[in-house]
C-alpha cells in the first residue's frame, strides 16, 4: 500500500500496526526520502555531544529496556544484577515491557539509585508506543532527559523502543542480542516471531552498537548484518562461589531415575555444535538400557541430532531437554559431563560443572589444560579424537572411586585457582556498555567528515563552474572586442 493510500484505523492494535508498518517499510516514500538525505539528517541529529550537560559526574546514567519481568521477584538474578550495577553506574532506570494490567505504572525503587518502571499494553504492537510514553513521562525533567545511554536487552520490542527513544533524545544506544532469531525453530515457536524478526532486522541493518554473549551468534550476525561495527562479546562471570554454596546447601535431586548411570551434554544445538562427537563416543555405552544420555540445549540442529540417535539405534537412551532456566539441578543428577565443544561459552559450562562436583570428560583447550590436570582432576581429550572420548568415558563407568576423586579435585581446582572478583566483572560490563559513547563520537566524526567532504566537493564544483563561466565570459569579451576592431578596420578609409 502506498503512502497516499494509507488509512488510519481506530482500533488501537490496528493503528499501532499501521504506524509500525509505515516506519519499518523500506519501500515507502518517507523511508526512501530519508535514505536519500541520510548523511545530512544523521549529521544534524548527532551534531551535538552525546552527553550535553557539564558536571563533575564521572559515572553514566543508564536506561535499560527489557522484557524480563523477573526483576519484580525479590531474590531473582535479574534484580541482583541491576542492584549490583550501582557500583559502576550513577543511576539505573529499568523499563519492563509487557507487564500484566494489575501492576500500576508507578515507578518502584529497588535500591538507592535503581528505579524500575512497569509498562502495560493491551496489544503486543502497542508495547513500543506505551513504553515510549512511560519513558518520556518518567525520565524527562526540566533539565532534560535523565539517562546518558539507552540499552535494550533484546533486539525486539525493547530494541525498537530504545532506538527511537535514543534517537529522539539524542542519546547513545546499544542493543544486546542473546537469542538466535534467525532459526526456523524461533519462527515456529515464538508467538510474535514475524514482528520481532522485523524489529531486529530493522535495527541491525542500521549498524547500531551490539553486544552478544556467544561466539556463534556473533559470527552469524556479522555475516548477515555487514554494517555492524561496534560489535563485541559481553564479559563473562562464572560465579563459582555461588554455585559451590548452592551445592553445599541444597539436597541432590534424582531427575532421571530411569537410568542408573547418566551422561550429560550441555550446549547450543547449532550446526557448529560437536554433539555428534559426544553421541558417537557414547553410543557403545548406550547399548546398555540402564545408561542414559541427557542433552540440554536448543537450536536449529536439534532435529538432525535426534535423527542421528535414531540412525544409531540409541534414541530411547538419549533425552533432549530444552528451555532449562537452571541447569545446576540437572548437572547434580548426572554422573559425567561430556564436553566436546571448545567455544568460549563452553568454558562457562565446564566451570559450573566443576563447581557442582560433576566429573568431566572434555576437549582440551588452553584454559582447561592450565586449570586441570589430565587423569587427576578430569579427563582431557584431543578435540577431534572420538575414540579417546569413548575410552575415557568407559573408565569412568567402570570406576566409581575415580569419579569421586575427580569430582573433589576439579571442585578444589576451580575454588582455589580461579580468582573471581565480581567488581572487576561489573567494571568490564560497564566498559562494554560505555564503549558505545566512544563509538558514537567516532561515528559523529565520520558523519562530520562526510558532510565536510561533501561541502568541499560542492565548493570545488562551484569554483570550477565559476572558473568556466569566467573563462567563457572572457572569451566572449575577447571575441566581441575582436569583432568591433574588425568592424573599425573595415570602415576605415583607405589611403
Image: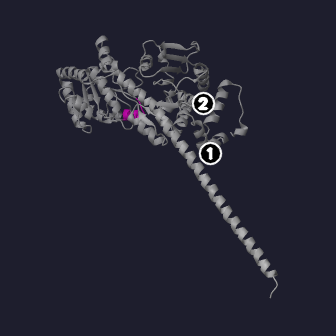
Q: Earlier in the sequence, mark 1 or mark 2?
A: 1
Per the rendering, the mark at residue 36 is: 1
Secondary structure at numbered mark 1: helix
- For image coordinates 28% across by 35% down, the residue present is 280
Residue 98 seen in render: yes
Residue at the spot of label 2: 168
On the image, the x and y values in percent for residue 157 come to 55, 28
Which of the 4 image quadrants contains residue 218? top left
Q: Which of the two discs, 1 and 2, sits closer to the camera?
A: 2
* Region in magenta: 298-307
Quadrant where the N terminus sits is top right
135 is within the stretch colored magenta: no
Residue occupying the far front of the picture:
495
Q: Position of residue 223 (x, y in %)?
A: 45, 42
The residue depicted at 56 percent of the width and 16 percent of the height is: 100
Place of residue 77 in the rendered image (x, y in percent of width and height, measured from the top left): 41, 18
Residue drawn at point x = 71 percent, y = 65 percent? 473
Front-lying residue, 248 or 425: 425
Say whether residue 267 is left or right of residue 388: right
Left or right relative to 342: residue 484: right
Taking the image as drawn, is residue 300 in sight?
no
Which is more toward the observer, 139 or 347? 139
Q: Is residue 301 magenta?
A: yes
Relative vertical location of residue 385 with respect to residue 491 in this rendering, above or below:
above
Q: Residues within 10 Å of mark 1 (few under 14, many from 20)?
A: few
Q: Dot 2: what SS?
A: helix
Residue 174 or 444: which is nearer the viewer?
444
Q: Name the main secondary structure of what is drawn in magenta.
A: helix
Please identify the quarter of the rendering in which residue 384 is found: top left
Amino acid at each position: 500500500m502506498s503512502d497516499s493510500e494509507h488509512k488510519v484505523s481506530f482500533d488501537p492494535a490496528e493503528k499501532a500496526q499501521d504506524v509500525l508498518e509505515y516506519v519499518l517499510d523500506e519501500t515507502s516514500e518517507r523511508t526512501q526520502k530519508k535514505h536519500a538525505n541520510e548523511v545530512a539528517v544523521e549529521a544534524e541529529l548527532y551534531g551535538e555531544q552525546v552527553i550535553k550537560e557539564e558536571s563533575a559526574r564521572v559515572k553514566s546514567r543508564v536506561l535499560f529496556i527489557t522484557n524480563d519481568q523477573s526483576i519484580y521477584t525479590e531474590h531473582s538474578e535479574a534484580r541482583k544484577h541491576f542492584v549490583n550495577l550501582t557500583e559502576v553506574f550513577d543511576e539505573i532506570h529499568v523499563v519492563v515491557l509487557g507487564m500484566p494490567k494489575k501492576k500500576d505504572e508507578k515507578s518502584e525503587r529497588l535500591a538507592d539509585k535503581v528505579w524500575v518502571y512497569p509498562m502495560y499494553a493491551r496489544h503486543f504492537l502497542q508495547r513500543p508506543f506505551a513504553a515510549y510514553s512511560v519513558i518520556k513521562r518518567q525520565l524527562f525533567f526540566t533539565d532534560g532527559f535523565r539517562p546518558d545511554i539507552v540499552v535494550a536487552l533484546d533486539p525486539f520490542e525493547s530494541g525498537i523502543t530504545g532506538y527511537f527513544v535514543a534517537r529522539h533524545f539524542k542519546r547513545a544506544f546499544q542493543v544486546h542480542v542473546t537469542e538466535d532469531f534467525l532459526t526456523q525453530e524461533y519462527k515456529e515457536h515464538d508467538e510474535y516471531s514475524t514482528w520481532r524478526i522485523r524489529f531486529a532486522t530493522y535495527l541491525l541493518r542500521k549498524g547500531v552498537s551490539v553486544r552478544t554473549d556467544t561466539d556463534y551468534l556473533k559470527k552469524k550476525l556479522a555475516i548477515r548484518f555487514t554494517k555492524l561495527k561496534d560489535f563485541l562479546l559481553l564479559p563473562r562471570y562464572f560465579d563459582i562461589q555461588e554455585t559451590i554454596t548452592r551445592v553445599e546447601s541444597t539436597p541432590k535431586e534424582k531427575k532421571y531415575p530411569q537410568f542408573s548411570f547418566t551422561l550429560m551434554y550441555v550446549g547450543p544445538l547449532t550446526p557448529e555444535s560437536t554433539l555428534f562427537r559426544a553421541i558417537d563416543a557414547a553410543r557403545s555405552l548406550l547399548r546398555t538400557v540402564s545408561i542414559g544420555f541427557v542433552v540440554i540445549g536448543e537450536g536449529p540442529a536439534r532435529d538432525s541430532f535426534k535423527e542421528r540417535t535414531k540412525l544409531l539405534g540409541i534414541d530411547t537412551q538419549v533425552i533432549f531437554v530444552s528451555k532449562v532456566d537452571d541447569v545446576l539441578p540437572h548437572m547434580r543428577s548426572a554422573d559425567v559431563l561430556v564436553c566436546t565443544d571448545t567455544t568460549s561459552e563452553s568454558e562457562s559450562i565446564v566451570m559450573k560443572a566443576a563447581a557442582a562436583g560433576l566429573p568431566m570428560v572434555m576437549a582440551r583447550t588452553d584454559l582447561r589444560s592450565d586449570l586441570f590436570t589430565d587423569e587427576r582432576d578430569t579427563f582431557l581429550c584431543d578435540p577431534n579424537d572420538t575414540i579417546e572420548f569413548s575410552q575415557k568415558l568407559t573408565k569412568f563407568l567402570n570406576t566409581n572411586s575415580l569419579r569421586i576423586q575427580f569430582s573433589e579435585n576439579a571442585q578444589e581446582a576451580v575454588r582455589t585457582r580461579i580468582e573471581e572478583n565480581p567488581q572487576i566483572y561489573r567494571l568490564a560490563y560497564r566498559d562494554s556498555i560505555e564503549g558505545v559513547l566512544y563509538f558514537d563520537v567516532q561515528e559523529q566524526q565520520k558523519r562530520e567528515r562526510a558532510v565536510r567532504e561533501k561541502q568541499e566537493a560542492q565548493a570545488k564544483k562551484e569554483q570550477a563552474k565559476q572558473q568556466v563561466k569566467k573563462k567563457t565570459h572572457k572569451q566572449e569579451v575577447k571575441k566581441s572586442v575582436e569583432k568591433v576592431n574588425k568592424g573599425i578596420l573595415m570602415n576605415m578609409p583607405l589611403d
